[in-house]
Amino acid sequence: MYLTTIAVRNNDEKVKDHIFSGLEAIKKGDINITHEEYTAGDTVFIKCGLKEGFMSKLIENRNNEDFRYSLAQVLCDVIINNYESKILKKIIKEYYLYLTDYEKELIYENSLKLIKQEDECKEGFYEQTRRTRIIRKILNYLKSENFIIIDGFVNFRLTDYIKELGDIVDKAVEEYIAEREYNEFIKLLRYFVEIQESKLDTINIIPSEEGSYFLIDSMKKPINCECFEELKSEITDSNISYDDLLISTLITVAPNKIIIHDTQNFKNKELLKTISSIFYDRIDICRGCDMCSILKGNKELN
């Protein structure tokens, strides 16, 4: 007894193989199904349903429901594994014409990472919710229809799913542009540091528990200089944070060497990344020294 016919493009071998593998998996379960295929033009039609002998063993309606649910799971896997990447690439191509081919590929890869991250951070919640929504759409469709064209179903019945993927692409683009602007800004700061004369040879940075920083010279003495005092006075007159003040101080002083101590106690890990990016060849990360133990005896940057 055939319940559903699935239409697939004949040249889409991956989709066809996925469907047939899914149907074989259903056969190995408790549902005894049968299927056959025939080709018309460039389309393959896969007819599938319950074997007649199986219908007499259990209640017919329950058998039909079990079959439809199993088939919906198969089709959901087909859509996620075979159509999701195509949809992402189509969205990127149609809505982000100003990006280069290289940038579009980066956005595509970042979109896949975002989907994976969503799944990992929610311990499967995101993926299961996504699957559940697609399965529910398929089940509702199969209750009233016995013929499904996968391409058409994705394009016209899964508009919410496509919009969700569009939102993910938008987020990937926003993150990429922000990262690109950040890198350009870092390059500008790096150039500024490289062309100016160093006012100090070495600066040691030690974080305090309050979120500020000790700045110590190569002689293990607190750093006090005119430019530093000017910058320090600004923090009381504006919204400049200790992190901003530290970056401004380092750029103004442009030391030949920066030794960063006690990195695990930096409250803002992005600050370490920024300092390392600007002063990349002048950075030395301390793994432990006598200076790390004299934190309370030095003048605090506040």
Image (cartoon, rainbow, N blue to C red):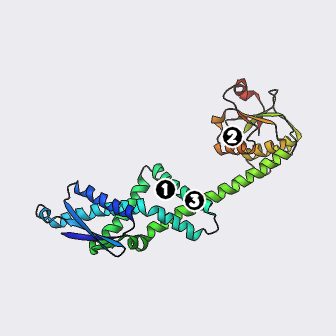
**From the viewer's perspective, is 218 left or right of 241?**
right
Above or below 204: residue 83: below
Residue 51 appears at what percent x and percent y? 16, 64
Q: Residues within 10 Å of mark 3 (few under 14, many from 20)?
A: some
Image quadrant in which the N terminus is located:
bottom left
Q: Which residue is mark 2?
A: 211
**From the viewer's perspective, is 220 left or right of 99?**
right
**From the viewer's perspective, is 235 left or right of 35?**
right
The residue drawn where x is 30% and y is 61% is 20
SS for dot 1: helix
> Which residue ends up furthest to the top in the rendered image?
290
Above or below 31: residue 198: above
Amino acid type assigned to the residue bearing label 1 in the image: Ile
Mark nearer the N terminus (3 vs 1): 3
- Name the foreground residue: 42 vs 201: 42
Image marks 2 and 1: residues in contact by CB distance under 8 Å: no
Which numbered marker is on residue 36? none
Residue 95 appears at what percent x and percent y? 58, 70
Q: Which residue is mark 3?
A: 105
SS for dot 2: loop
Image quadrant in which the C terminus is located:
top right
Marks 3/1: CA–CA distance: 16 Å
Q: How many marks?
A: 3
Mark nearer the N terminus (2 vs 1): 1
Marks 2/1: CA–CA distance: 34 Å
The residue drawn where x is 37% and y is 59% is 77
Which numbered marker is on residue 115? 1
Residue 281 appears at what percent x and percent y? 75, 39
Amino acid type assigned to the residue bearing label 3 in the image: Glu
SS for dot 3: helix
Mark nearer the N terminus (3 vs 2): 3
User: Which mark is nearer the camera, 3 or 1?
Assistant: 3
